[in-house]
Image (cartoon, helix red, strand yellow):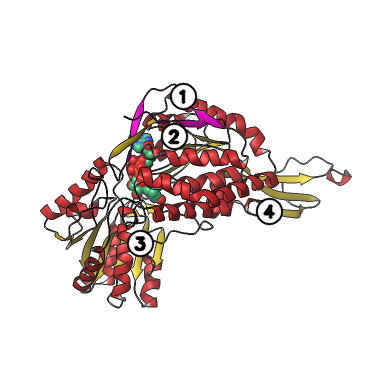
Amino acid sequence: MTTKTISHWVDGKSFVGTSTKTAPVTNPATGEVTAQVALASVEDTRAAIDAAAAAFPAWRDTSLAKRVQILFKFRELLNERKPELAKIITSEHGKVLDDALGEVTRGQEVVEFACGIPHLLKGGMTENASTKVDVFSIRQPIGPVAAISPFNFPAMVPMWFFPIAIATGNTVVLKPSEKDPSAAIWMAELWAEAGLPAGVFNVLQGDKTSVDELLTNSGIKAISFVGSTPIAQYVYNTGTAHGKRVQALGGAKNHMVVLPDADLDLAADAAVNAGFGSAGERCMAISALVAVGGVGDELVAKINERAKTIKTGDGTKGCDMGPLVTKQHRDKVASYVDAGEADGATIALDGRQVQPDGGENGFWLGPTVIDNVTPDMSVYTDEIFGPVLSVLRVESYDDALELINSNPYGNGTAIFTNDGGAARRFQNEVEVGMVGINVPIPVPMAYYSFGGWKSSLFGDTHAHGAEGIHFFTRGKVITERWLDPSHGGLNLGFPQSH
Ligand code: NAD
């Protein structure tokens, strides 16, 4: 019997709220329901927005020196205690512990980036733009902002946003995925320990009800969303229609092109790592392998050889790959394998038969390789988000490029080759936001910005780096003079320099 309820964090403390609606949280490796998560009502959502609004005036006026001290403290606590957070992630998401730790570390890098905020927020200044007139530019926070995150990175994706939002003087309401809600609460407690004033960082557990209130309530000034494409589009349309700044990152279908001159052993290692890491539940996972000019047979053989050695099981037991997040998702992913088979593709490695090292009710699916996939099959057209690698065979580099550029998604892609000229053409011609050259998962560092093209991102601002600073601030330009007699006289013409 489960009694634990995971609730919200509002105004510096745990907040139960008025809603009695909950959703189950499961341990994917055992299938056990471990807790219920509260699903916020509109009233509960308003309480979180009000707390963020009340904290904003004082936080926006808190000196950069003080903000940075708190950020450094948060970074130190996170660095010391990240194994605790990794354990929480594994227990609700299912990814193996090492991978969970890697997720936290990549999030921590954004905290470290945000620690440099005094430098990042410096404006420009022009002396004597007109006679004895100076002009300068500053960037100011925009107010209470919301971040709405997906299940697959319950710590890293929120950390793409909140360290920068907070560093730049905004207050935050985070609405994590209801599938793995505990990481957000752990991070909220850490912020309190680091000395962040109450109300600057709030966590609201919930579903569509709370998201809709965040999208339409005038108290929220900007929305950072990450999730599937249909919801990203909905969030972008609704949020912008309500006058908010929105960045909405969506789904993906990431291609890895292998040219005939590539080292096929290294390419096979990369395809396996990028296809099956985190059970393929990464928006930067490789899900479509494009074998160019006859390398297909040898490459698939090498991939199978490696993928067969992957130990699927409980993420706390030293396995390579964990379960999928829910039973429903596991069954949906398996149904794509069935569909690929029915469509005439070759199931080169069948994860439906996996013998996991984990609970018999866990949500298991082993590494699956589907060969001879064609662009019309659902295993190719849809984002599967599981450990399923589809192999497509094409004649030439141009065919590979055409395939990728015709795909509606444009999140990440990679090319494997030793030909610098081909790699350079690819980097120039491919219509995708993040490109790897012999790097299968080209996730940008925190000081660059993360984001895809086409249906993988709605809005024009990517996450973190310079674009993150830009998103969470707005520009102001001040034109200043200190009056003396030379400034006298009437002139109704449009201001011009002299
Ligand atoms: P999801 O779209 O189901 O949910 C994302 C968030 O939206 C959650 O907080 C959820 O509660 C909320 N939500 C769900 N349905 C909603 C609705 N109808 N109205 C309002 N809010 C709703 O996504 P998910 O399954 O949690 O995450 C996986 C997806 O996220 C994949 O498509 C993956 O590619 C994508 N993703 C993209 C990136 C990226 O950077 N582009 C990164 C990580 C994940």
Left-right relation of 440 to 50: left
Q: To which residue does mark 4 refer?
A: 124
Looking at the rendered image, the disc whose residue lies closer to the viewer, 3 or 1, is 1
> Of helix, strand and loop, which one carries label 2?
helix
Image quarter where ligand 1 lies? top left
Lower position in the chain sequence, tag 3 or tag 1: 1
Q: Are marks 4 and 1 in contact (CB under 8 Å)?
A: no
Residue 28 colored in magenta in the image: yes
Q: CA distance from mark 3 to mark 2?
A: 32 Å
The residue drawn where x is 39% and y is 67% is 439
Lower position in the chain sequence, tag 3 or tag 4: 4
Q: Quadrant of the N terminus?
A: top left
Q: Amino acid at mark 1?
A: Gly
Q: CA distance from mark 1 to mark 2?
A: 28 Å
Left-right relation of 210 to 172: left
Q: To which residue does mark 2 refer?
A: 241
Lower position in the chain sequence, tag 4 or tag 2: 4
The residue drawn where x is 52% and y is 33% is 220
| Residue 413 disc label | 3
Say few, some or many: other residues with alpha carbon within 10 Å of mark 4 (under 14 / 14 to 19 / 20 or more): few
Q: Which region shows up in magenta? A: 1-30
| Residue 17 disc label | 1
Q: Are marks 3 and 1 in contact (CB under 8 Å)?
A: no
Lower position in the chain sequence, tag 3 or tag 2: 2
| Residue 301 disc label | none
